[in-house]
């Protein structure tokens, strides 16, 4: 044996040892795994019994009643057409299940294991042969491939972004599916494929997948749609003898026999329904209500409990988004000027009861926030794009204006007017007009929630100080969704959800491809080649440390682009609950802080509440259809 052959053999042996230590099973080109984590290891061992944040002995039965603002006209949450009701994902199982006490870890669900090529060019999911739909037909490889292709070809645009690295699918057997991946450098893509919601191919061969429908369908998940009152109410019913009940990733969850969701057009009516016991749980989004209105009799008597849920989630990329497709907001200087005029300090004190913190990032509460000046690794990453970026990005920390005094407001007004002058606008007779055309600066702030109206009116008053007329338009949820999908707005207050490991979904949020596609998350219409390049870098991050650096660089470029006026967040989530339920400890896991999956119904508590004497009302007496219609219409 020559020295070269010896070195190759030695290195091969070392590689085998290393891989053998890090993967459950190693072959010459792949590893078989029981779960998957894009970065780091899995918390739970292969033979785990249940997640720590559930009670595996939780009793099954009873019901919970939820309330939602808005309406619905379809049961399909995966297409642009129509508005689907809250909670439809309860009806769908996925190949892998996330653990909500870990960052982006996934465990067996419909897939009992997976095999991943070492070079990242393919992944095989091996299905649990016991998995079936609610009509007892088996979930097979054909259903998985059908689900994948339907979502990619006919679903919302985000699925095309998610799956664009998949070259083809192959059915290896009734219970094995292989996905071929092109140039896959994304650590997250396997987890993305593991989250494919599983649809019944046989059902959708009869009813077109890309059409709205209120027809209940065979469900792969723990719940099925039992009853529907279009636009008003629906009931999810736990599937009898559901196939996944004893799978470790599902054990102790999905304990209610029925979950009823009622829809309301008016937020005040929705709150009154909760106070009257017609809704069991409420995530309180209004700081004013949480501070001043939770003193009704049921709270004082201990029948309603308030909780502040600790969490590890981001509020997402939340802010007042400019539609840069509109000529008015295509100019960055204009966007900076309007950002100067947003007085968060007054808003927080007078409308938000000082309960919120200002966002200075697109990734609040996550380590991806760009703070201070870019570090060495960030400068190296951003260096090739230096000529395409604002010079101050490299020399100044990104900051937002503060308005603590009248002097601060005057400084912001002066700065805003100078920026607007540079952009071609001048102030004449207290009205901002274009220097060449004389056309006044007028735009629309589109909202669908009366609570947002107060925020909008506050901003409207401050924009008057620089001669800008902002029209506030309040419309119903369905019309709002339609205009959102058509990108027909000047400005909206919007949140784009962010997870603990940014990846493929960033394409749908900020890329040039997504900018002109209806229904994407790129609400600002961003078309910036630097951002596109950084998105791909984020997706291709080989480890978590690199991901943090690259996501911070993306955040920094987004911030200096002034595509939105950053909003605010809380460190806890306020929740109020009628005392009818039992809970695990903690009530909700840190990465799903509003989840009811681990709760259960307690008949003894409910019996106490059903007694009208202590409450002065029969909270368990069901409403008539007319009573529910009156509540829904706000006719209380």
Image: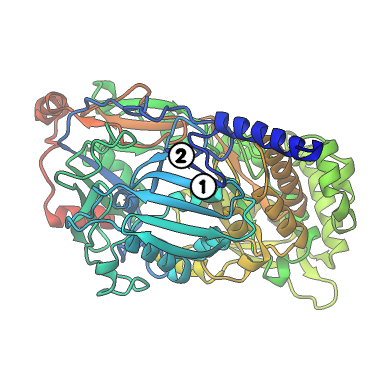
Local SS, label 1: strand
Q: Quadrant of the N terminus?
A: top right
Question: Would you name the residue on which mark 1 appears?
Answer: 116
* Mark closer to the chain start, 2 or 1: 2
Using residue 446 as the reference point, say whether residue 628 is left or right of it: left
**Where residue 178 sits: x, y (%)?**
45, 57
Question: Would you name the residue on which mark 2 appears?
Answer: 33
Q: Is residue 354 visible?
A: no
Using residue 461 as the reference point, say whether residue 629 is left or right of it: left
Q: Nearer the viewer, residue 239 or 229?
A: 239
Q: Quadrant of residue 20?
A: top right
Q: Is residue 599 visible?
A: yes
Estimate how packed mark 2 is, as few (under 14), some (14 to 19) or many (20 or more) residues with alpha carbons within 10 Å.
Answer: some
**Where residue 300 sits: x, y (%)?**
28, 22
The relative height of residue 557 versus residue 145 in the rendered view (above or below) is above
Q: Nearer the viewer, residue 242 or 491?
A: 242
Using residue 314 as the reference point, say whether residue 111 is left or right of it: left
The relative height of residue 199 versus residue 611 in the rendered view (above or below) is below
């Amino acid at each position: 044996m020559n020295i070269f052959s010896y070195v190759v053999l030695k290195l091969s042996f070392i590689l085998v040892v290393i891989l053998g230590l890090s993967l459950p099973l190693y072959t010459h080109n792949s590893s078989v795994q029981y779960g998957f984590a894009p970065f780091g290891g899995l918390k739970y061992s292969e033979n785990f019994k249940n997640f720590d944040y559930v009670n595996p002995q939780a009793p099954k039965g009873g019901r919970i009643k939820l309330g939602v603002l808005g309406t619905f006209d379809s049961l399909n949450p995966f297409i642009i057409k129509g508005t689907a009701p809250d909670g439809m994902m309860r009806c769908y199982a996925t190949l892998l299940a996330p653990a909500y006490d870990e960052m982006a870890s996934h465990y067996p669900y419909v897939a009992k294991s997976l095999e991943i090529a070492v070079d990242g060019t393919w992944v095989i999911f091996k299905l649990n042969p016991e998995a079936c739909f609610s009509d007892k037909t088996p979930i097979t490889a054909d259903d998985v491939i059908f689900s994948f292709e339907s979502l990619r070809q006919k679903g919302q645009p985000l699925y095309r972004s998610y799956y664009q690295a998949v070259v083809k699918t192959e059915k290896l057997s009734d219970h094995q599916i292989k996905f071929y991946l092109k140039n896959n450098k994304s650590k997250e893509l396997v987890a993305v494929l593991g989250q494919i919601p599983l649809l019944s191919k046989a059902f959708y061969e009869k009813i077109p997948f890309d059409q709205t429908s209120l027809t209940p369908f065979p469900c792969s998940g723990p719940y099925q749609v039992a009853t529907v009152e279009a636009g008003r109410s629906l009931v999810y019913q736990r599937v009898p003898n559901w196939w996944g009940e004893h799978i470790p990733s599902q054990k102790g969850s999905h304990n209610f026999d029925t979950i009823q969701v009622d829809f309301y057009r008016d937020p005040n009516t929705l709150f009154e329904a909760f106070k009257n016991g017609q809704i069991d749980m409420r995530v309180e989004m209004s700081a004013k209500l949480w501070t001043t209105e939770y003193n009704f009799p049921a709270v004082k008597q201990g029948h309603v409990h308030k909780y502040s849920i600790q969490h590890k989630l981001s509020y997402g990329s939340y802010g007042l988004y400019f539609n840069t497709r509109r000529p008015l907001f295509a100019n960055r200087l204009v966007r900076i000027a309007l950002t100067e005029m947003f007085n968060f300090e007054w808003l927080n004190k007078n409308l938000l009861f000082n309960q919120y913190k200002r966002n200075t990032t697109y990734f609040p509460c996550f380590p991806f926030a760009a703070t201070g000046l870019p570090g060495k690794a960030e400068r190296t990453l951003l260096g090739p794009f230096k000529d395409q970026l604002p010079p101050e990005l490299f020399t100044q920390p990104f900051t937002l204006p503060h308005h603590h005094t009248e002097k601060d407001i005057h400084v912001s007004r002066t700065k805003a007017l100078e920026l607007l002058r540079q952009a071609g606008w001048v102030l004449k007779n207290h009205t901002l007009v274009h220097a060449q055309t004389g056309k006044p600066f007028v735009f629309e702030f589109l909202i669908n929630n009366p609570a947002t109206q107060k925020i909008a009116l506050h901003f409207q008053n401050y924009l008057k100080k620089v001669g800008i007329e902002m029209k506030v338009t309040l419309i119903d949820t369905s019309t709002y969704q339609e205009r959102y999908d058509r990108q027909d707005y000047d400005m909206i207050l919007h949140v784009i959800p962010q997870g603990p490991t940014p990846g493929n979904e960033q394409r749908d949020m900020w890329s040039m491809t997504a900018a002109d596609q209806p229904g994407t998350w790129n609400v600002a219409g961003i078309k910036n080649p630097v951002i596109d390049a950084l998105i791909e870098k984020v997706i291709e991050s080989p480890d978590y440390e690199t991901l943090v650096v690259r996501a911070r660089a993306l955040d920094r470029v987004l911030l200096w682009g002034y595509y939105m006026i950053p909003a605010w967040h809380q460190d806890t989530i306020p929740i109020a609950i009628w005392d009818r339920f039992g809970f695990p400890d903690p009530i909700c896991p840190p990465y799903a802080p509003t989840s009811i999956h681990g709760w259960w119904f307690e008949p003894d508590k409910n019996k106490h509440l059903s007694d009208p004497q202590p409450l002065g009302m029969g909270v368990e007496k069901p409403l008539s259809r007319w009573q529910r219609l009156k509540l829904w219409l706000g006719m209380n």
